[in-house]
Amino acid sequence: MKIAAYCQYVLGIGHFFRILEICRALADHDVLLITGGPPVDAHLPKHVRHVPLTSLKMDKQFTRLLALEPGQDVEQIKSRRCRRLLDIFRTEKPDVLLIELYPFGRRAFSFEIIPLLEMLHSRPHDRCSVVCSLRDILVEKNDPQTYEARAIRILKRFFDALLVHGDPNVIRLDATFARTADIPVPLVYTGYVAPAVPEGARRRLRAELGLAADEKLVVASAGGGRIGGQLLSAAVAAMNFLEHPSGCRLQLFTGPFGKDSAIADLKRRAAKNVHIARFTTDFLSCLAAADLSLSLGGYNTCMNILASGVPALVWPSPQDREQGLRVERLAELGAMQRLTQADLDPRRLAVRMQPLLQQAERTHIAIDMQGAAATARWLAAHADGRRRL
């Protein structure tokens, strides 16, 4: 089976890594990973072919598209991307298109998505199945009635199924999409998409970092790096107020899209026991090695926290409801503790950190985290069923 996965990320990198984990699970198939955001350092499995489109991003207000490289004409990029996307599907003829988020988001990319869907829909006897890949929680909209009606209309016209990558025992789609009952295609909860911790990761990473057996490791992270600077700044300063700062190390990841000036400021203020890097391809192993995580509440980071079982203090981005709602539900289950804006005072953050640094046991809760494997099985069964018709 040949599967094309389309993923356009504009703020963080969670969307990219979630779809990549699903692609990894499709190891028995030929996979095209089509992306349109800034380059991300990630290892691709041999069965995955990466097809990058010319990068586009959104402005800070999420009102218009911008070229990644200054001086490029956005309309020309849009035209090239649309032609390229149609050519890919004419040439490759995939059995399934797994499209991330749309039509629940990425409306600004309708210029290329709708022509592609119309082309695929025009081949009723040799049609590529179209499946929406959706995370657990949607952001709020200014006009939810119009937004939900539009999403349902597009699903009805072009899509064959909706896969929600979450556990309904944690949160259901209707918590953030009121008209779930009106969705006109099969709605399948796959479980959360989360990688497994590599065997021996804690021992290996602690040895690589040269940590003593009794030395504590704190990992602070900010996802892609475009938001979360307040948390990282507080983490650097809080290390000075711990009871035994010399017995604790902070490994801080700013995110690949963090501003150079902000990173330089963190490095100026960092003590000797603070190590700063932009990014690591082995973040999950870092959490396995850690005694405490300080982070935002994005989907992928939360799943990495759950997979590793690391004690965690999580500050959900105040940008919209998504992270706050996720962290609230997971905190109720005992998977993490929520930080407030007031907790970003360095002295207060140190007080929140101290008891968790002394916690010996890892946290493990009963949540379905087999979403990648379940998605792969569902897509294979769906394509096989269509072939038998």
Image: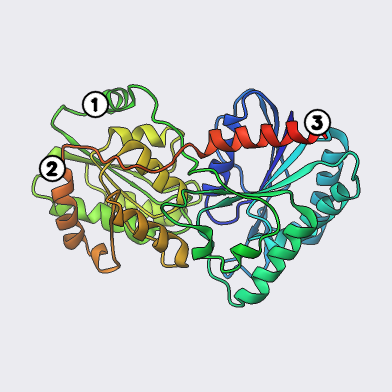
Q: Is residue 121 left or right of residue 251?
A: right
Quick check: can you spot residue 13?
no
| Residue at the disc numbered 2 | 358
Quarter-of-image position of residue 381: top right
- Disc sitting over residue 388 in the figure: 3
Label 3 sits on a secondary structure element that is helix
Q: CA distance from mark 2 to mark 1?
A: 20 Å
Label number found at residue 281? none
Mark 3 surroundings within 10 Å by alpha-carbon count, few (fewer than 14), some (14 through 19), many (20 or more): few
Measuring from the top left, give residue 58's x and y in whole percent: 63, 62
Depicted 377 relative to depicted 168: above or below: above
Residue 389 x %, y %: 83, 35
Of the pair 53 and 103, the residue shown nearer to us: 103
> Where on the picture, by quarter, is residue 64?
bottom right
The three-letter code of the residue at mark 1 reads: Gly
Residue shown at the point (80%, 31%) measured from the top left: 388
Foreground: 89 or 73? 89
Marks 3, 2: nearer the viewer? 3
Give the label on residue 210, or none: 1
Question: Tag 3: residue type?
Answer: Arg
Question: At numbered mark 2, what does the secondary structure look like: helix, strand or loop?
Answer: loop
Viewer-proximal residue among 313 and 256: 313
Disc nearest the viewer among 3 and 1: 3
How far apart marks 3 and 2 lie (CA) works out to: 58 Å
How many residues crowd around disc 2 within 10 Å: few (fewer than 14), some, or many (20 or more)? few
Q: Earlier in the sequence, mark 2 or mark 1?
A: 1
- Determine the secondary structure under disc 1: loop
Q: Which mark is nearer the camera, 2 or 1?
A: 2
